[in-house]
Image (tube, rainbow, N blue to C red):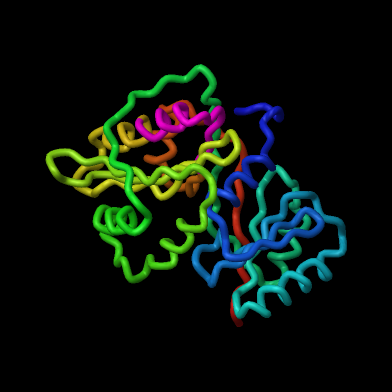
Amino acid sequence: MLTSAINFKEIEYAGFRSLPAEQQLEFDGIVLRFNSGYTKRANSASILLPQKDEYSNLVQQCEQLYQAKDLPCIFRLPSFAQNQQLDNYLAKNGYQYTDHSLVLYRSLQGATFINENLSSKQPLEWLQSYCRISQTDINHQQPQVARLNRINDKLFLAVLSANDQELACGLSVISNKYCGIFNVVTKKTARNKGIGSKLLNGMLCQAVINGATEAYIQVVSDNIPAINLYKKLGYQYAYEYHYRVKTHR
């Protein structure tokens, strides 16, 4: 368990910068992101500060902003902001709990990692590799190219190959001093063979070389194999978050 010395809000803002939405607004400790409906994280209102009792006004204001973009209103609630009463209010007003996730953290100061031989690709090339490895239809991933091209910080689009076969890939972004790693996937036939560990070692090595001193990673809470891998690499629990999505009746 990490201490309160870790700046959770800095990690949040590093994450926002690392995978930027098309538009971002802020008010009263709430960060609202809009990205044409692509992913919940890029199309939700993250509540980063404790909110007062006027929940109806807050929710109504957020709903209006998302409705104006023809998007569903989604709230994202990190645990460190301690908004249990707001969470209860949302639950009572038709917002469904979903996608409980963990944010794991580790310091990179003084750390050493194996510098695996990873390929560095351009956004479209990397997305093609990602879709081949994950067996995902690239036609459903096209918004990701524009999103990757919006990143202004140090971006590493990594692919691990062996014997001319692509086995795993992921992307990392260094924003300020933080390295965030996202979209990690390993080919089904290559799982449980240490491939994910090699990929992450190489990515973290590159992060250290490029000046990162802290690292975080987001993972769905029921992805036990991934969590175990990250813990072996020195990551520890920092905080968690979940979404509230309005159900249609």
Residue at position x 61%, y 74% in the image: 72
Indicate the quadrant where residue 63 lies: bottom right
Q: Is residue 239 left or right of residue 85?
A: left
Q: Position of residue 151 (x, y in %)?
A: 51, 53
204 left or right, relative to 99: left
Magenta span has 112?
no
- Residue 29 position (above or below residue 112): below
* Residue 125, percent from left and from top: 30, 56
Asked which quadrant contains residue 193, the reply is: top left
- Give coordinates of residue 141: x percent, y percent: 38, 65
Residue at 72% over, 68% down: 92
In the image, farthest residue toward the top: 110
* Count of numbered labels shown in the rendering: 0
In the image, is 68 to the left or to the right of 185?
right
Position above or below: 9 against 105: below
Classify the position of the N terminus by image quarter: top right
Which residue is farthest left?
A: 163
Q: Residue lying at the far bottom in this picture: please name it.
A: 249
Q: Measuring 70% from the left and 57% from the top, which residue is drawn there? A: 31
Q: Quadrant of residue 52?
A: bottom right
Q: Is residue 91 above or below residue 134?
A: below
Q: Residue at x 35, y 32 (%)?
A: 202
Out of 17 and 229, give the one closest to the viewer.
17
**Residue 85 in the image, given as x and y percentages of width and height:** 78, 56
Q: Quadrant of the C terminus?
A: bottom right
Q: Which residues are magenta?
A: 202-217
Q: Is residue 208 magenta?
A: yes
